[in-house]
Image (spheres, rainbow, N blue to C red):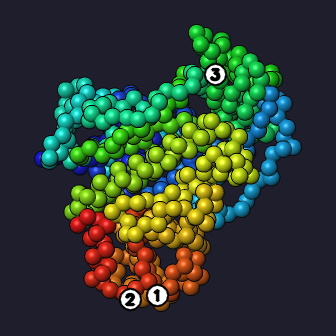
């Protein structure tokens, strides 16, 4: 007998996101976090439109957008010091609507601000979150998983999700190996400080590549009046408070009052688990794969892991899918992790190709995908997709790649004010058809699925006949597309196939 359906080890952004998505699908969870409180350090800050779509689905669109940093302009400057930024090079503010997503974030969202939204949201959706709860052992059998805590408690769960970061205990307890070089590069100091740079300089970009020889690094806006400076820590040097303050003052290049709030060293890590599933246990986020930070690929990929896994666990727990559906978590997300790891590695080696939107030829020459493609344009190939089209039409243009192929994410189209095709999906499977698809809609209803008829322009945009249909998974990926005559029995057979029933 289980104490809880799902135990999540790790209460950072990915662990809390897992709890939110499980709760969205009606599944209770217990989150165990070894730290005494949520991390006050901003860590990652680039939350992609696709990740915003996940939170939109869970009803957190407004809360997450309200947590974004809006005091700085969304551009990257390169300068010797902050005082020497050439503001004439700032791009004009864009009010253009995204062609590929219903989400157009107002700003960037550091992890500490995102976690402050996710923690109450997880609890509101049925999760119990415990801080200061250290896991010391993990054991599983055919019927469940037992998690032992440092305080002596043993908690029984139907499934376990390891979201406990780069130094994961869950992965080690499960005996899952890794590939990759591990730590790469030297040590970097991550210095969090408060300063009114906007008030002093009049305006500030979100990101500044500081090129002063005594404080070369990256300055990031992480809140209203809060900043993080990343600078290399020379071998053998002690990162004292005085040294941190000196780095900050040098990087700013002007007499601005500064308060150092926190500082911590870190080293980039590249490592991937050989398995993302073992029995009733799963790895998500940095516990599954850790990558270098350039490109904002790590956090967004981790939240996508959680989103992929949650609906599958929910269906299996509800008895509407077979255990084989859970195997597709590894099949799909491990392949994405391989893609993302390679793309992160290429960015680490070729930073200018990442930053320059016009560098398509350079990216193609080394095998680098444009960043939006890495986060939204990838495709799934597993038993949860029928006849997937695995080769993307473009590694640069997401709009071209989100074309309605099986295995790709459903393309976004506005169908009413404030309502996108993306909003037609979840928490269950759905059928979308063209204007002549009423028979497929009826077949969907007979199989207990929601169905929507859309107009001819939409059907043409996904090269689908007016009476054709798409079967779309709860995570927005296309599981099957058909131009055949409507057949409720065939639809039922396909649904059973992709859910391993």
Pick the residue in front: 245 or 164: 164
CB of mark 2 within 8 Å of CB of mark 1? Answer: yes
User: Is residue 401 visible in this depiction of the protein?
Assistant: yes
Q: Quadrant of residue 249?
A: top right
Q: Secondary structure at mark 3?
A: strand
Q: Position of residue 224 (x, y in %)?
A: 66, 37
Taking the view exactly as shown, the residue that stands out farthest to the left is 1
299 sits to left or right of 71: left
Q: Position of residue 28 (x, y in %)?
A: 28, 51
99 in relation to 354, above or below: below
Quadrant for the C terminus, please: bottom left
Pointer 3 residue:
232
Distance from the alpha carbon under mark 2 to that under mark 3 = 63 Å
103 in relation to 35, above or below: below
Pointer 1 residue:
467
Report the disc number at residue 485.
Answer: 2
């Amino acid at each position: 007998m289980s104490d809880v359906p799902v135990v999540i080890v790790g209460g950072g952004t990915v662990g809390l996101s897992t709890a939110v998505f499980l709760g969205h699908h009606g599944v209770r969870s217990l989150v165990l976090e070894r730290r005494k409180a949520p991390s006050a350090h901003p860590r990652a800050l680039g939350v992609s439109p696709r990740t915003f779509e996940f939170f939109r689905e869970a009803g957190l669109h407004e809360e997450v957008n309200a947590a974004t940093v809006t005091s700085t302009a969304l551009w990257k400057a390169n300068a010797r010091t902050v005082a020497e930024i050439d503001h004439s090079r700032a791009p004009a503010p864009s009010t253009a609507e995204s062609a590929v997503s219903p989400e157009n974030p107002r700003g960037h969202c550091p992890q500490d601000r995102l976690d402050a939204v996710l923690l109450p949201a997880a609890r509101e959706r049925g999760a119990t979150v415990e801080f200061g709860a250290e896991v010391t052992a993990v054991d599983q059998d055919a019927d469940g998983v037992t998690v032992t805590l440092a305080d002596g408690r043993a908690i029984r769960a139907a499934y376990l999700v390891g979201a406990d970061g780069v130094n994961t205990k869950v992965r080690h307890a499960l005996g899952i190996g890794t590939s990759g070089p591990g730590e790469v590069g030297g040590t970097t100091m991550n210095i969090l400080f408060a300063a009114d740079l906007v008030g002093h300089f009049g305006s500030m970009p979100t990101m500044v590549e500081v090129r002063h020889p005594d404080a070369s690094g990256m300055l990031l806006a992480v809140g209203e009046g809060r900043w993080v400076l990343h600078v290399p820590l020379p071998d053998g040097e002690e990162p004292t408070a005085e040294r941190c303050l000196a780095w900050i003052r040098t990087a700013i290049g002007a007499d601005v009052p500064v308060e150092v709030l926190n500082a911590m060293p870190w080293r980039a890590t590249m490592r991937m688990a050989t398995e993302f599933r073992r029995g009733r246990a799963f790895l998500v986020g940095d516990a599954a794969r850790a990558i270098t930070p350039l490109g904002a690929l790590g956090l967004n990929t981790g939240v996508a892991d959680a989103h992929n896994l949650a609906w599958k666990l929910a269906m299996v727990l509800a008895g509407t899918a077979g255990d084989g559906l859970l195997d597709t978590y590894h099949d799909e997300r491990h392949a994405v992790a391989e893609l993302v790891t390679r793309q992160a590695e290429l960015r680490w080696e070729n930073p200018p190709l990442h930053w320059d939107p016009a560098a398509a030829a350079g990216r193609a020459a080394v095998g680098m995908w444009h960043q939006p493609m890495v986060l939204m344009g990838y495709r799934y190939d597993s038993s949860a997709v029928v006849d997937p089209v695995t080769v993307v039409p473009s590694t640069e243009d997401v709009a071209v790649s989100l074309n309605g192929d099986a295995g790709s994410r459903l393309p976004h189209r506005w169908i009413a004010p404030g309502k996108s095709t993306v909003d037609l999906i979840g928490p269950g499977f759905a059928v979308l058809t063209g204007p002549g698809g009423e028979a497929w809609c009826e077949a969907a209803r007979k199989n207990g699925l929601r169905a929507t008829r859309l107009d001819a322009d939409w059907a043409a945009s996904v090269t689908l006949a007016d009476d054709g249909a798409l079967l779309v998974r709860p995570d927005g990926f296309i599981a099957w597309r058909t131009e055949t005559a409507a057949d409720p029995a065939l639809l039922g057979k396909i649904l059973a196939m992709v859910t391993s029933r």
